[in-house]
Image: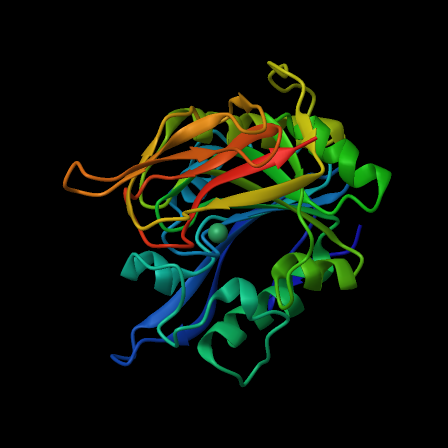
Amino acid sequence: MPDIVIDGHKVSPGQDIQINALIARLPTRTPINIPVFVSRSTKPGPTLLVMAGVHGDETNGIEILRRIIINNYHKPTKGTVIAIPVFNVYGFINHSRGLPDGRDLNRSFPGSKNGSLASRVAHFMTSEILPQVDFGIDFHTGGASHNNFPQIRGVFNTVKEMEVAKAFGAPFIIESPFREKSLRKTADKANKTILVYEGGETLRLRKKVIDTGVDGMLRVMKYLGMRDDAPEIEQKSIYLKTSTWVRAKYAGLHHADVRNGSRVEKNEVLGLITDPYGQFEKKIKSPVNGFVIGINNYPVVNMGDAILHIGSE
Ligand SMILES: [Zn+2]
């Protein structure tokens, strides 16, 4: 088996090392390193990337990676695991989604060596990590007060991709088209599959979301032959082909009256939008049959704000 080289560090079969990749410096000259944990078995097998914190405020994903490392789940019996708990270090420090240049890292791929800060961080992934990888799971958390019910997102243009998603065993598998300049799209161009796990909301840790993420990673490792055991799937994933946002028709206070993850019928009342004075009250109805896969928990809404995400079979 050949050595893996990341940021100039050689990792041989049987080695288990932490690489602190120097990405940039703060204006104080303090170095900004991205810790990359590489664990290789002596036995050949696939290379699995598990990563979080592409959006720096998406803490559930970061905790999933911490739990994986503290329990040594990133040490495979076959193959290699590359684990990156906090990819966007800047965002993590600043409690923010993006980088100090105002860019969203997941809209900055493939990136460039001498581009903006986000572009440079993306380039590190594209040039140093992706070429080593067979499969990846990118752990996210709902953005800006959106609470996502645990779900795997992908395009599923190969059978294996769907099989890996099913093996993960999240409550939902959601068809999610590629976005321009995203990590998933760049990976696809290089014939690598990255699935996205979404669960919970930014800046909050949710145990159920974290447990589902950790168990899912173990099941994917077992499916890929990288470990012998994994927790049983509690319930088979429900595959949702499309998803749609319910947007606020009125400005006011949103009162959700539906549980995240629950099945809803077309025209079912999902909640209310009211004014703050007791003079205005309008029902929100589901536009489709489906399942609630995300709820915006911020109660003050403007016209057109996305308030509920509904996926349909
Ligand atoms: Zn995200």
Q: Residue 141, can we see it?
A: yes
Q: Which corner quadrant holds the C terminus?
A: top right
Q: Nearer the viewer, residue 53 or 181?
A: 181
Quick one: which residue is furthest to the front in this view?
279
Name which residue lies at 63% across and 20% down.
230
Q: Nearer the viewer, residue 187 or 171?
A: 171
How far from the left and from the top, in percent, is residue 58?
40, 48
Quick one: which residue is furthest to the right in this view?
159
Q: Is residue 174 above or below residue 230?
A: below
How far from the left and from the top, in percent, is residue 8?
60, 69
How far from the left and from the top, in percent, is residue 11?
64, 55
Q: Residue 77, can we see it?
A: no
Q: Total number of numbered labels?
A: 0
Q: Residue 95 falls in which quadrant of the image?
A: bottom left
Q: Residue 258 falls in which quadrant of the image?
A: top left
131 relative position to 95: left or right: right
Quick one: which residue is furthest to the left in this view?
277
Quick one: which residue is furthest to the bottom in this view?
114
Q: Nearer the viewer, residue 179 or 256?
A: 256
Q: Is residue 110 above or below residue 178?
A: below
How far from the left and from the top, in percent, is residue 74?
57, 37
231 relative position to 79: left or right: left
Name which residue lies at 66% across and 69% down.
127
Q: Residue 117 falls in which quadrant of the image?
A: bottom left
